[in-house]
């Protein structure tokens, strides 16, 4: 991993951490982003949607999860399988029991049933105007998206604060996967055109 990427990652995380403690921070950000997502996307009744369990200053996708459950859609969470970069996906219902796993991320205890998402809602540290994201540097989402896209059409949706957009292109490598869109509380960035 290049030192340039490490510097961008560190600064982007510090910036996002400061956003959520700023006096200008909007506590309704997550709900506003959820509204944009539900207005922007149509969900077939058999769609499987992957979300994430938020850690730190990540924008909270729980308002999205609630809206998806209200529509009786299948919601799942990504989980890290030891020794693999590619994520597995486990259903998430209101009854799901959690345990804290690697990186302090809560994961469902029961991983006996797996699913394959059609739509992935993905956290990020920063994103550029081409749809590339800066993640935490482990490559889990890039590997997973590459694998899923080789099997079928999936939609990769970043969830972020608008302030996480960067004007200059982020440094990318051959394995970096582009997002199809980024949903923020203020607007939708659609990179599919």
Image: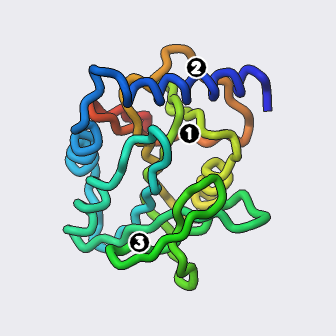
Q: Residue 182 is drawn in which quadrant? A: top left
- Which residue in the structure is indicated by mark 1? 178
**Please, which residue is most extreme toward the top here?**
168
Label 3 to label 2: alpha-carbon separation: 35 Å
Q: Earlier in the sequence, mark 1 or mark 2?
A: 2
| 31 and 139: which is toward the camera | 31
Q: Residue 177 is drawn in which quadrant? A: top right
Relative to 155, is 142 on the left or the right? Answer: right
Which residue occupies 46% across, 55% down? 52
Q: Earlier in the sequence, mark 1 or mark 3?
A: 3
Residue 155 percent across, percent down from the top left: 45, 52
The crowding category of the residue bearing disc 3, from other C-alpha atoms within 10 Å (few below 14, some 14 to 19, many at least 20), is many
- Name the front one of labels 3 and 2: 3
The disc label shown at residue 92, or none: 3
Q: Is residue 21 above or below residue 68?
A: above
Q: Are marks 1 and 2 in contact (CB under 8 Å)?
A: no
Relative to 88, is 184 on the left or the right? Answer: left
- Which residue in the structure is indicated by mark 2? 169
Q: Answer whether residue 46 is visible to the viewer in this image.
A: yes
Residue 83 percent across, percent down from the top left: 79, 64
Q: Which quadrant does the N terminus fall into?
A: top right
SS label for mark 3 = loop
Q: Is residue 45 above or below residue 125?
A: below
The crowding category of the residue bearing disc 2, from other C-alpha atoms within 10 Å (few below 14, some 14 to 19, many at least 20), is few
Residue 70 percent across, percent down from the top left: 20, 68
| 188 and 53: which is toward the camera | 53
């Amino acid at each position: 991993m290049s030192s340039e990427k490490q510097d961008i990652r560190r600064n982007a995380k510090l910036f996002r951490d400061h956003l959520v403690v700023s006096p200008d921070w909007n506590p309704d950000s997550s709900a506003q982003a959820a509204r944009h997502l539900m207005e922007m996307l149509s969900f077939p009744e058999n769609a499987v949607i992957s979300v994430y369990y938020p850690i730190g200053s990540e924008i909270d996708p729980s308002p999205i999860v609630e809206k998806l459950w209200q529509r009786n859609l299948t919601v799942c969470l990504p989980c890290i399988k030891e020794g693999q970069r590619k994520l597995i996906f486990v259903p998430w219902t209101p009854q799901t029991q959690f345990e804290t796993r690697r990186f302090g991320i809560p994961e469902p205890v029961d991983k006996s049933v797996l699913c394959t998402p059609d739509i992935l809602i993905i956290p990020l540290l920063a994103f550029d105007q081409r749809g590339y994201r800066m993640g935490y540097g482990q490559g889990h989402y890039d590997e997973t998206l590459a694998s899923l896209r080789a099997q079928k059409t999936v939609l990769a949706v970043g969830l972020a604060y608008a302030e996480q957009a960067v004007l200059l292109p982020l440094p990318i490598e051959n394995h970096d996967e582009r997002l199809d869109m980024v949903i923020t509380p203020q607007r939708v960035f659609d990179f599919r055109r």
